[in-house]
Image (cartoon, rainbow, N blue to C red):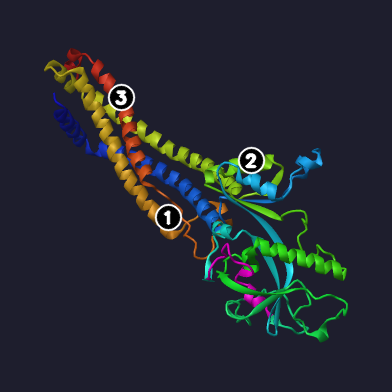
Amino acid sequence: MNNIDIILMALKNLFKRKLRTFLTILGVVIGTASIIVMISLGLALNKNFDNQLDQISDITLIKIYGIDDVFNKNLPESKKSKMDDKAIFNFKQLKNVESVTPIINLYGIKAVSGKYVANLSFVGLEPSFLKNLGYELESGRLLQEDDKFDILCGASIPFYFEKNTKRRNYYFYGDQEEQKALVDVMKDKIKISVDSNYGENKSLVEQDPDQKPAKVHSVKFVGLLKKSASYAEYDYNCYMPIEQVKQLKLEKEKFNKSSGANSNRYGNKNSDGYDNIYIKCKDLDCVKDVADQVKKMGYNLYYNGEYLESMKATAKNMQSLLGAIGAVSLFVAAIGIANTMIMSVYERTKEIGIMKVIGASIKDIKKIFLIESWIIGFLGGIVGVGLSLIISHVLNTTSISFFAMDSFSYMPDGAEKKIVSLIPVWLCVAAVIFAGLVGLCSGYFPAKRATKLSALTAIKSE
């Protein structure tokens, strides 16, 4: 018998018992659809975690915020970790580090535009590093390497400016869509000073005649960041090249010292180094390794990838659980296939005996039963994939939530819509192949039993 004859005979035998074949295939369909949908829920949860973290900030960014006091406790002073230029150099030498920038925070800088004044907070950093922070522009441009007293500001900064009267809020917490900024930072002339009384109405402040006035710098706002949906920190900051912020910091320290004020009240508490250091890694896979190396160097840090790792572990465990539940359905379907094929062997005992007598080989007889069981599994797998795609579409259209944690996960306005079920092509292909293998394995023992029947005994059976 050639292979075509064997396949045709297998199909003919299946169509003889249409209802039994249909019910057996239905079992495989339900099992396949169950396991695909269950796995798709886990994949969707994992995808939502990735999308959510992408919206919050760059997951390849490590933020060093201080020295690990426990690590440095017993070290000599010369070997203790510091947030300085040497640390920047060491971080740049680490494998898989793309770029590094020091950060200096400076508070209480007075900005004046005509009769309007504002208290601003400055962040000094390397201009080239801004592209790694993923900030979107509303207008203008990002900072460039040759910028001096040029400023990139957050969306709330224009609303900080108020008329220099006694009754002022100093900080803006209202709805920007309902109010108009009094100063157009991109067009109006603006000057800044480290003197908190600069630009104020002289009748409202006490003037020290011996106080040497602080320097006044004309600045240019070159860019305005797009407003975040979650009141992010960058909405309320002004960004300037770090060298200029260092200069302002020194001016503020000298001015405060001459006036007898606390030099660290509005300045950098870490006067011997940088406030923070940001490290940009080449990709997500190497972030943990870089972070571990930095920790071993004696620094405290955090990166959003830490949360991603824990969330992915949760999603992986849930995916395994859901897959196991679906696998039970497919296992039940496999038992159904085995039962169908065993019943087929019993019902076709005489037919098997006749095939042996007329010269059919044991190999051909085994092939017939194996192909029958494989066809059941294969057809059930294909229909099961189709059913799972329909179920997935319904779940995503209705946005049904299966996990309590979904209600606590944050997705900003304009973010990619949260998905409930995700079925990639590889899962469909794998499911069909797996269903076919399940059918093949389920038919193996019935096929083996058929080949062991005695030809004479089989012919005599009714």
Q: Which mark is residue 444?
A: 3
- Please state which of residues 50 and 107 is positioned toward the viewer in this rendering: 107
Picture disc at residue 395: 1
Which residue does the image show at 57% across and 69% down from the upper left?
Answer: 227
Q: CA distance from mark 1 to mark 2?
A: 40 Å
- Classify mark 3: helix, strand or loop: helix
Q: Position of residue 13 (x, y in %)?
A: 19, 32
Give amino acid for label 3. Answer: Tyr
The amino acid type, in three-letter code, at marker 1 is Leu
The residue type indicated by label 2 comes to Asp
Would you say the residues marked 1 and 2 are in contact, meaning their CB atoms lie under 8 Å apart? no
Helix, strand or loop under label 1: helix
Which tag, 3 or 2, sits closer to the chain's start? 2
Q: Position of residue 436 (x, y in %)?
A: 31, 34
Report the magenta residues as a range: 140-161
* Image location of residue 5, percent across then percent down: 14, 29
Q: Earlier in the sequence, mark 1 or mark 2?
A: 2
Q: Nearer the viewer, residue 454 or 167?
A: 167
Outermost residue on the left side: it is 358
Q: Report which residue position mark 2 lands on.
A: 292
Q: Residues within 10 Å of mark 2 (few under 14, many from 20)?
A: few
- Displayed quadrant of residue 114: bottom right
